[in-house]
Image (cartoon, rainbow, N blue to C red):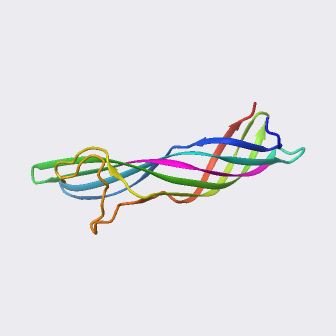
Protein backbone atom coordinates (compact mmCIF):
# COMPACT_ATOMS: atom_id res chain seq x y z
CA UNK A 1 0.00 0.00 0.00
CA UNK A 2 1.29 3.43 -0.96
CA UNK A 3 1.72 6.09 1.75
CA UNK A 4 -0.05 8.49 -0.64
CA UNK A 5 -3.50 7.21 -1.79
CA UNK A 6 -3.67 6.78 -5.57
CA UNK A 7 0.12 6.84 -6.08
CA UNK A 8 1.85 3.79 -7.56
CA UNK A 9 5.61 3.63 -8.04
CA UNK A 10 7.25 0.76 -9.84
CA UNK A 11 8.35 -0.87 -13.08
CA UNK A 12 6.63 -0.74 -16.45
CA UNK A 13 7.52 -3.12 -19.29
CA UNK A 14 5.93 -2.96 -22.72
CA UNK A 15 6.19 -4.68 -26.08
CA UNK A 16 5.58 -2.41 -29.05
CA UNK A 17 5.43 -4.28 -32.33
CA UNK A 18 3.87 -4.02 -35.70
CA UNK A 19 5.83 -1.01 -36.91
CA UNK A 20 6.50 -2.05 -40.48
CA UNK A 21 6.65 -0.84 -44.02
CA UNK A 22 7.88 -1.85 -47.38
CA UNK A 23 7.64 -1.88 -51.13
CA UNK A 24 5.87 -4.50 -53.22
CA UNK A 25 6.27 -4.16 -56.98
CA UNK A 26 4.69 -7.00 -58.96
CA UNK A 27 4.31 -7.41 -62.70
CA UNK A 28 2.99 -10.77 -63.87
CA UNK A 29 5.17 -13.47 -62.30
CA UNK A 30 8.06 -11.07 -61.57
CA UNK A 31 8.31 -9.10 -58.34
CA UNK A 32 10.48 -7.02 -56.05
CA UNK A 33 9.56 -6.93 -52.36
CA UNK A 34 11.25 -5.15 -49.49
CA UNK A 35 9.73 -5.39 -46.00
CA UNK A 36 11.00 -3.72 -42.83
CA UNK A 37 9.64 -4.55 -39.37
CA UNK A 38 10.58 -3.00 -36.04
CA UNK A 39 9.77 -3.76 -32.41
CA UNK A 40 10.57 -1.96 -29.19
CA UNK A 41 10.75 -3.32 -25.64
CA UNK A 42 10.86 -0.44 -23.14
CA UNK A 43 11.88 -1.34 -19.57
CA UNK A 44 11.03 1.63 -17.36
CA UNK A 45 10.44 2.80 -13.84
CA UNK A 46 8.15 5.57 -12.79
CA UNK A 47 5.01 6.74 -11.07
CA UNK A 48 1.29 6.70 -11.78
CA UNK A 49 -1.30 8.71 -9.90
CA UNK A 50 -5.03 7.84 -10.07
CA UNK A 51 -7.93 9.75 -8.49
CA UNK A 52 -11.27 7.97 -8.06
CA UNK A 53 -14.54 9.85 -7.95
CA UNK A 54 -16.55 9.02 -4.81
CA UNK A 55 -19.77 7.15 -5.61
CA UNK A 56 -18.92 6.86 -9.34
CA UNK A 57 -17.15 4.04 -11.20
CA UNK A 58 -14.79 6.51 -12.96
CA UNK A 59 -11.18 7.34 -12.19
CA UNK A 60 -8.68 9.70 -13.79
CA UNK A 61 -4.93 9.60 -13.69
CA UNK A 62 -1.59 9.98 -15.32
CA UNK A 63 1.90 8.65 -15.26
CA UNK A 64 5.54 9.45 -15.94
CA UNK A 65 8.01 6.66 -16.73
CA UNK A 66 11.58 6.53 -18.03
CA UNK A 67 14.17 3.86 -18.72
CA UNK A 68 15.94 1.93 -21.46
CA UNK A 69 14.41 0.50 -24.62
CA UNK A 70 15.63 -2.46 -26.64
CA UNK A 71 14.95 -2.36 -30.39
CA UNK A 72 14.77 -5.48 -32.56
CA UNK A 73 14.42 -4.89 -36.29
CA UNK A 74 14.40 -6.97 -39.46
CA UNK A 75 14.56 -6.39 -43.19
CA UNK A 76 13.64 -8.87 -45.92
CA UNK A 77 14.37 -8.46 -49.61
CA UNK A 78 13.03 -10.85 -52.22
CA UNK A 79 12.89 -10.68 -55.97
CA UNK A 80 12.03 -12.86 -58.95
CA UNK A 81 13.09 -11.85 -62.42
CA UNK A 82 12.61 -14.38 -65.22
CA UNK A 83 13.20 -17.71 -63.46
CA UNK A 84 15.76 -16.41 -60.94
CA UNK A 85 14.44 -15.99 -57.41
CA UNK A 86 16.49 -14.43 -54.60
CA UNK A 87 15.53 -13.83 -50.97
CA UNK A 88 17.69 -12.28 -48.24
CA UNK A 89 16.98 -11.15 -44.70
CA UNK A 90 18.87 -9.37 -41.96
CA UNK A 91 18.31 -8.60 -38.27
CA UNK A 92 19.37 -5.45 -36.43
CA UNK A 93 19.34 -4.39 -32.79
CA UNK A 94 19.86 -1.24 -30.76
CA UNK A 95 18.88 0.53 -27.60
CA UNK A 96 18.46 3.90 -26.00
CA UNK A 97 16.60 6.17 -23.63
CA UNK A 98 12.81 5.97 -23.46
CA UNK A 99 10.39 8.25 -21.62
CA UNK A 100 6.59 8.34 -21.48
CA UNK A 101 3.98 10.72 -20.12
CA UNK A 102 0.35 9.66 -20.21
CA UNK A 103 -3.15 10.43 -18.98
CA UNK A 104 -5.93 7.89 -18.50
CA UNK A 105 -9.65 7.58 -17.86
CA UNK A 106 -10.88 4.31 -16.33
CA UNK A 107 -14.23 2.73 -15.63
CA UNK A 108 -14.14 0.28 -12.73
CA UNK A 109 -16.28 -2.72 -11.90
CA UNK A 110 -15.16 -4.04 -8.53
CA UNK A 111 -11.48 -4.98 -8.62
CA UNK A 112 -11.32 -4.72 -12.45
CA UNK A 113 -10.92 -1.43 -14.32
CA UNK A 114 -10.42 -0.61 -17.96
CA UNK A 115 -10.11 2.56 -19.94
CA UNK A 116 -8.42 4.84 -22.45
CA UNK A 117 -4.79 5.99 -22.29
CA UNK A 118 -3.41 8.96 -24.25
CA UNK A 119 0.17 10.21 -24.02
CA UNK A 120 3.51 10.81 -25.67
CA UNK A 121 6.63 8.64 -25.90
CA UNK A 122 10.22 9.72 -26.52
CA UNK A 123 12.24 6.76 -27.78
CA UNK A 124 15.08 7.55 -30.16
CA UNK A 125 17.44 4.66 -30.86
CA UNK A 126 20.65 6.44 -31.94
CA UNK A 127 22.13 3.50 -33.85
CA UNK A 128 21.24 0.03 -35.06
CA UNK A 129 23.80 -2.77 -35.29
CA UNK A 130 23.92 -5.86 -37.47
CA UNK A 131 22.88 -8.97 -35.50
CA UNK A 132 24.98 -11.25 -37.76
CA UNK A 133 27.66 -11.11 -40.45
CA UNK A 134 26.36 -10.23 -43.93
CA UNK A 135 28.81 -11.54 -46.51
CA UNK A 136 26.83 -10.09 -49.44
CA UNK A 137 27.24 -6.55 -48.06
CA UNK A 138 30.65 -7.05 -46.44
CA UNK A 139 29.57 -6.18 -42.91
CA UNK A 140 30.36 -7.91 -39.64
CA UNK A 141 28.17 -8.65 -36.65
CA UNK A 142 27.88 -5.66 -34.27
CA UNK A 143 28.88 -3.13 -36.95
CA UNK A 144 26.71 -0.01 -36.91
CA UNK A 145 24.14 0.18 -39.72
CA UNK A 146 24.94 3.20 -41.90
CA UNK A 147 22.97 5.40 -44.27
CA UNK A 148 24.21 6.04 -47.81
CA UNK A 149 25.91 9.25 -46.59
CA UNK A 150 27.91 7.30 -43.96
CA UNK A 151 25.96 8.56 -40.93
CA UNK A 152 24.53 6.14 -38.37
CA UNK A 153 21.05 4.80 -39.11
CA UNK A 154 18.86 5.84 -36.13
CA UNK A 155 15.30 4.68 -35.49
CA UNK A 156 12.74 6.98 -33.94
CA UNK A 157 9.87 5.36 -32.02
CA UNK A 158 8.74 8.70 -30.56
CA UNK A 159 5.16 9.77 -30.95
CA UNK A 160 1.61 9.81 -29.71
CA UNK A 161 0.39 6.94 -27.51
CA UNK A 162 -3.26 5.91 -27.76
CA UNK A 163 -4.37 2.67 -26.19
CA UNK A 164 -6.62 0.71 -23.93
CA UNK A 165 -5.68 -0.51 -20.48
CA UNK A 166 -6.95 -3.18 -18.15
CA UNK A 167 -6.03 -3.36 -14.47
CA UNK A 168 -6.80 -5.68 -11.61
CA UNK A 169 -6.81 -4.42 -8.03
CA UNK A 170 -6.01 -6.63 -5.07
The majority secondary structure of the magenta stretch comes to: strand
Q: Is residue 31 left or right of residue 128?
A: left
**Is 141 on the left-hand or right-hand side of 128?**
left
Q: Residue at x 90, y 44 (%)?
A: 55
Query: Where, quadrant-wise, is the C terminus in this rendering?
Result: top right
Residue 167: give x, y in percent of width and height: 69, 38
Instruction: Depth check: give the residue in front, 69 or 121.
Output: 69
Q: Quadrant of the N terminus?
A: top right
Question: Extreme left residue here?
Answer: 83
Does the segment drawn in magenta span residue 69?
Answer: yes
166 in relation to 129, above or below: above
Total marks drawn? Answer: 0
Q: Residue furthest right?
A: 55
Above or below: residue 31 compared with residue 112: below
| Front residue of this view, candidates 82 and 77 | 77
Q: Which residue is drawn at 23% across and 48% down?
A: 140
Q: What percent of the width, then of the height, locates residue 14?
A: 55, 43
- Taking the spot 28% from the left edge, 47% from the top edge, the residue there is 90
In the rendered image, residue 63, in percent from the top left (x then y), is placed at 69, 51
Residue appearing at x 71%, y 47% in the figure: 48
Q: Nearer the viewer, residue 169 or 144?
A: 144
Q: Where residue 59 sits: x, y (%)? A: 79, 48
Q: In which quarter of the image is residue 119?
A: bottom right
Work out which residue is located at the far bottom of the displayed protein and give it: 149
Q: Give the range drawn in magenta.
A: 59-73
- Quick check: is 67 in the magenta stretch? yes
Amino acid sequence: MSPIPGLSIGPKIEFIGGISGGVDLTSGSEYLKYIYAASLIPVMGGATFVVSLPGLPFSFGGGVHAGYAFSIDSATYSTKISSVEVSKSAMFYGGGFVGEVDAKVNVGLGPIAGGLVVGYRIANIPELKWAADNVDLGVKKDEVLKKENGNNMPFDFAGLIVGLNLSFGF
